[in-house]
Amino acid sequence: MQAIAQKQQDAFDVIIVGAGVAGLYMLHRAKQAGLSARLFDAADGIGGTWYWNRYPGARVDIESFEYSYSFSPELEQEWHWTERYASQPELLRYFEHVAQRFELYPHIQLGTRIDSAVYDEARGQWAIATQTGQTYRARFCVMATGCLSAPKVPDIPGYGSFRGDCYFTSRWPHEPVELAGKRIGVIGTGSSAIQFTPVAAQVAAHLTVFQRTPNYSIPLRNRPMDLDYEKRMKAGYEQLRRMQWRSPGGFVLVGGEPRLPLTTSALAVSAEERLSEFEARWQAGGLCLYTCYPDLMTSKEANETLAEFVRAKIREKVVNPAVAEKLTPRNHPILTKRLCADSGYFETFNRDNVTLVDLQETPIETITERGIRVGGREIELDVIVFATGFDAVTGALLNIDIRGRRGQSLRAAWQDGPKTYLGLMSADFPNLFNVAGPGSTASLSSAIPCDEHQIDLVMRLITRSRNGGGAGIVEPTHAAQDAWTERIQAIAAKTLIHESNSWYVGANVPGKPRVVLLDLEGFSAYIDVCDGIIARDYEGFVFESAPAGVPAEDSVALA
């Protein structure tokens, strides 16, 4: 009896990997549907990226009212944001509140790393093994591992030699880190570094920023939450959500007002009108330049009008013309790398205690015991901060040994680039859902509405597969998968995305296949495609009955 009880406790309808935005909502939906579910995360707390990325200055770059769950009107009204753009600690409190309010914690197992997920064809189940050797079984497995959750190990000579303190922005310590009065070196100039740099400069004895590629960044213009603004936003939440879900990026606020993207070409208006539009969005702050003219990602000429506008702003901010020139991006079209939003990043280089090292001119020769050697000289440091990014979109997923039908490895199946249907499932991997996976709009769309929509689709597929009273099986056809993968690349070929060596195309990780990882058509178009597929009786998906002869205690898991 004890063995049977243990087997039942280790069997579930749904197993979810990842306790971030997507995982928490998936667990909520599974509970609502009466499915037994267990959520695993390697971290000791929930929050996903907001658990790990707790470096000084970390905050969201989409307005708090939009970067929040839409599934509960009561939650929308009761939560009070203290800033227009929430900081990491506040976001973590928000997700902890969600987990408590919707009674998710009893179904979450933290501090548990998943090593493998193997499909058992005889049972029609997934066997999920932890790092400690325990195995759990489930009919459905939902990978909510995140797009930006697998840190990229620096490929720098001498890495590991430094005897001072080393930190990753993506794995910042939970205990306080003393930076005051220290000589700090920051490697990287992506979003994390652009947030961290102004904060570190205020306390450092000296801050040295090692820049390989200058990035476009616009002001965030964060400020404390105004209570009248909060009242107005909450009163208009229904309209705001409706507009979010009909927009390419899943966010629509421009200076506190919801606006759908323009439909006119940037080249169809006068230079004065175009400049006025750019200026209004620059003053509004945040990422609203993404929702500007529709041809900024498809026309070099249109793109250059925005790029030059931002370059001119950088030159205005930085006093030293030579430093300004080094900080000015010229080697890639704007928006083909993730646009950054900052709080005084460029102005930081006007400080006496800040130095910029251009790695295009003087590459890092090696990390030494005392610092970093560039251009034949050693820069002595007390602290090195690696803001070197992520193995994005596929990294966290492929860090798990996932094996589908006939023992096929997902890593092998994707060796020439990921292949998915709707960025959600892959052929020969039944009942395995990759939320915000390659081929979805993840990372180009605001994370929460994108995740909510995909998880709603997961629940539709699970419900459809179980119709008739059985726990069924669903997977995409190879033809549907191939067509979707070709679609992603065909859409990308019409854009400027390949003119940038970004993580959007896997270019930041040596040896990673150079393919576009995202659906560039946008969130609202993705929703329309999915709606059409559902209307055509789940076109491209195959549904099967569960294998016969599965023991009763395995066929329906117990909570």
Image (cartoon, rainbow, N blue to C red):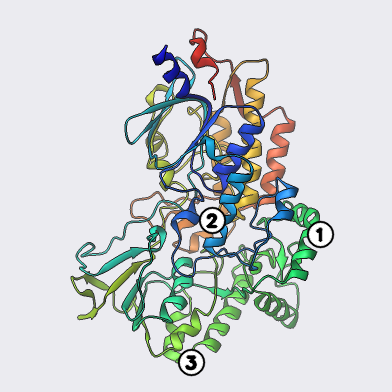
Camera-nearest residue between 347 and 215 = 347
Where's residue 559, x and y in %?
54, 25
Q: Which mark is residue 99?
A: none
Q: Which mark is residue 235?
A: 1
Which three-letter amino acid code belongs to the residue tagged 2?
A: Leu
Which three-letter amino acid code belongs to the residue tagged 3?
A: Val
Give the class, few, some or many, for how many residues have Cα within 10 Å of label 3's Cα (few <14, many ≥20): some
Gap in angstroms between the C-alphas marked 1 and 3 = 44 Å
Which three-letter amino acid code belongs to the residue tagged 1?
A: Ala
- Callout 1 touching callout 3 (CB < 8 Å): no
Q: What residue occupies the far top of the structure in this picture?
A: 549
Q: For the residues carrying marks 2 and 3, which lies nearer the camera in this image?
A: 2
Where's residue 308, x and y in %?
58, 79
- Residue at the spot x=39%, y=69% of the render? 188
**One can see residue 440 in this view:** yes
Q: Name the residue carrying label 2.
A: 92
Residue 230 left/right relative to 515: right
Vertical side of 351 occupied by 404: above or below: above
Which secondary structure, mark 2?
helix
Vertical side of 362 occupied by 59: above or below: above
Q: Name the residue carrying label 3.
A: 319
- Residue at the spot x=72%, y=37% of the render? 532
Q: For the residues carrying marks 1 and 3, which lies nearer the camera in this image?
A: 1
- Residue at the spot x=59%, y=64% of the render? 86
Gap in angstroms between the C-alphas marked 2 and 3 = 37 Å
Which secondary structure, mark 3?
loop
